[in-house]
Image (cartoon, rainbow, N blue to C red):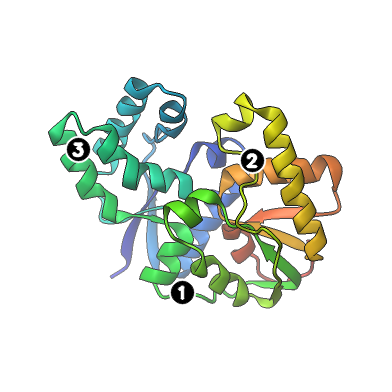
Amino acid sequence: MTKEVSMFIPCIVNLFHPEIGESAVSLLRQAGVNPIYHRGQTCCGQPAMNSGYRREAKKAAKHFIKLFGNDDVIVSPSGSCVCMVKYHYPELLEDEPEWSRRAAELAPRVYELSQYLVDVLNVTDTGAAFKGTVAYHESCHILRGLGVSAQPRKLISSVKGAELVPMNQDDFCCGFGGAFANSYPDISGAMVQDKVQNFLDSGADLLVLCEPGCLLNIGGFLSRHHPEKKAMHLASFLAQKGSGDRQ
């Protein structure tokens, strides 16, 4: 019997990079699970909470819990959104015991995509191909919030023809940080410039990462200043088939 998995597609993916969601669905189907999508899903409330709008964040959290509360597994291609649901919902709703309880019960069933593929499904080889060198950016929420680092690297290293190369300061923030980039654009701009320089210095053909926000930030900088270089979400990278030529 095919296992059913509920997909949580974050705002940035929905609005700017739908191909990430499509790739995530393709990877899960290939792994033998049946992805489902609740059309009523909305933002997890992370931007509202980070901006101090706790009442609005609570509203989003309760909606999420009501919508996904009966699902056995929820998978998302965004570590920051997974962190919000797993760790911040119980805290956000702590003054409402029943909602906090429901949030705590939901938390263990929410996974970041690479975490679910490797740790739960025991998948490391997706049949992808890429002829070239790849650097990996450690997104803050995925690395520090979820403790996920080895999983994406295992998946990248299993891609036919790909060579994973080291990158200096790969675990440094790219400067996105959601509202941070809007509130402190000069600092954010300097941080992403440093991140891109480290990528260029690595000599890698492609930068792979797991966080849509980081992709928006780094990819945007690359398109403006180094259009010959590309960044790609892990889901899109792993969904590549065929010749595996350099992007």
The residue closer to the viewer here, 58 or 24, is 58
> At label 1, which amino acid type do we have?
Val
- Disc tally is 3
Residue at left 72%, top 46%? 219
Q: Helix or strand or loop: what does disc 1 sit on?
A: loop
| Residue on which the image places disc 1 | 123
> At label 2, which amino acid type do we have?
Gly
* Vertical arrangement, residue 240 with respect to residue 124, above or below: above
Place residue 206 in its image quadrant: bottom right
Foreground mark, 1 or 2, reads 2
| Residue on which the image places disc 2 | 175
How far apart in space, not on screen, are marks 2 and 3 (Cα)?
Answer: 31 Å
Residue at left 79%, top 46%? 222
Place residue 1 in its image quadrant: bottom left
Q: Are marks 2 and 3 in contact (CB under 8 Å)?
A: no
Foreground mark, 2 or 3, reads 2
For the question of whether residue 70 can be seen, the reply is no
Residue at left 55%, top 34%? 178
Residue 182 located left or right of residue 98:
right
> At label 3, which amino acid type do we have?
Ser
| Residue on which the image places disc 3 | 100
Q: Tell me if mark 1 has few (under 14), some (14-19) or many (20+) residues whose alpha carbon lies within 10 angstroms of its own.
A: some
Residue at left 36%, top 69%? 120
In the image, residue 89 lies at what x, y percent? 30, 38
